[in-house]
Every structure is written in structure tokens, then in C-alpha cells.
Amino acid sequence: MLNQEHKLYFPFILYVRPHATNTFGVYKLNWITQEIVFRSKIENCISTLPFDYEHKIADLVFGLQTGYLTEIRRCAHAAINEFNVHRQVDGYMQDLCLKPGVSYVETAFRLLADSILDEHSDYYTRAYVLKTIAFHAMLYKFWCCQTTKTSIYENARLYDLAQASRTAQKIKHPDYDLDKSTEEISKFLEAIKNHQKVFEESKRCLKRKQK
């Protein structure tokens, strides 16, 4: 459960350069605030994502047209406003009231995932699995230090990945390799599962030290 007044920390969207087509800008995400909050809650030096994925997400670049950038920022501000409302409700109703804010967060990262640039072509990637894993990885990284274990899985939509894999089987695409993609999704989910165990143990160690 989240606190009734819960501050959210979004990554900074940093402008890198104009795209060669001059139709959109190239951006990266700076997750420094999440990292600081994360470090304050753990005992051991671990990252906010499994090691391999931490670097992959950090290296992503996004091609954002003005409309996308405006909508991402609007969703981020709307989510912050929702979480900063003091509601005089309890238990399940509190979490229910926060769902619109969670949806705004999800929408912001969905728009980002849809704007990932391919590092070789310097244009929007056509890799379905890259977009899928990046979307869930960014959500996990965002919520990892900002909510409880149960809510992390729910808010990061990790339970939906199995369904995404089944849906992918119906997609006919020249860049899509079914066996490889299913394997990549399974590998990602297993890595997240192991990361969560280490993360929770690290939080328990810190609490024991603070007693």
C-alpha cells in the first residue's frame, strides 16, 4: 500500500540532439533521482534493475516529436498530482483511488517505449520484443523504490508479459523471431524475479541495522 500523500520521482528527459530529419528531437532518460531514493532504502550496492538490463535501459535513446513530449510530460504531472492528493479513505479504497495516477505513469512510459530509436538505423525501432521488455523494465525501475513488492509487479504489468508472448505468436513480421523473442521475455522475467529477491533481502538487512 502507498502512503496517502506519496511523492513520485520521474526520470529527467534530457535533450541530446536534433534528428537528421529535423522532424523530432533525440532524448535520453536520466534516472539519478530514482537511484538516490533507491540507495536510501537498501543495504547492499545493487542496481534498480538486473545488471544486464540496467545498462540496456540506460543506453536507450528516444525520438520524441513535440506532441509525444508534451503528452509524456502531461501524464507525469497528472500522476504526481494524483499521488499528492490527501484522501480520507482507507485500505483497499486508497489503492483504488490511486489507480488513475498509476495509469498516467504507465501511459508516459508506453509513449516512451513507442519512441525508441534503433542504434544502427537511427530511426524508430521495429523490434517488438525490445519495445515490450523496455516498457516493462522502465516501469519496474520506476516503481522499484516507490512502492511495495506486490504493487511493483502489478504496476509494472509484469503479469502481462506472458500474455504479450502469446500475442506475439500471432504477429507476422520480418524482424520477429518467435523462439528468440519468447526466450528473451522468459529470461527478462527470471532476471526480475531474482533481482526482487536480492532487493527485498537488502531492505531487510538495512532495517535490522537501523534497529
Image (tube, grey):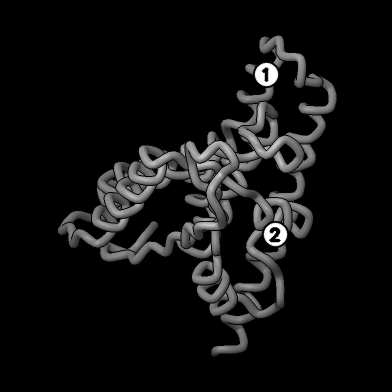
Residues 85 and 73: in front is: 73
- Residue placed under numbered mark 1 in the picture: 168
User: Reading the chain from its start, which is encountered first: label 1 or label 2?
Assistant: 1
Instruction: Locate the C terminus by quadrant.
Output: bottom right
**Relative to 187, is 8 above or below?**
below
Left or right side of 15 for 74? left
Which residue is drawn at the image coordinates 54% and 79% (left, top)?
40
- The answer to whether residue 157 of the structure is visible from this angle is no
Q: Residue at x 62, y 74 (%)?
A: 204
Identify the residue under disc 2.
197
Report if residue 30 is visible in the image.
Answer: yes
Percent x, y of residue 161: 63, 32
Residue lying furthest left: 88
Image x and y of residue 132, in percent: 62, 34
- Residue sitting at x 78%, y 35%: 184
Q: Is residue 67 above or below residue 170?
A: below
Label 1, residues with CA under 10 Å away: few <14, some 14-19, many ≥20: some
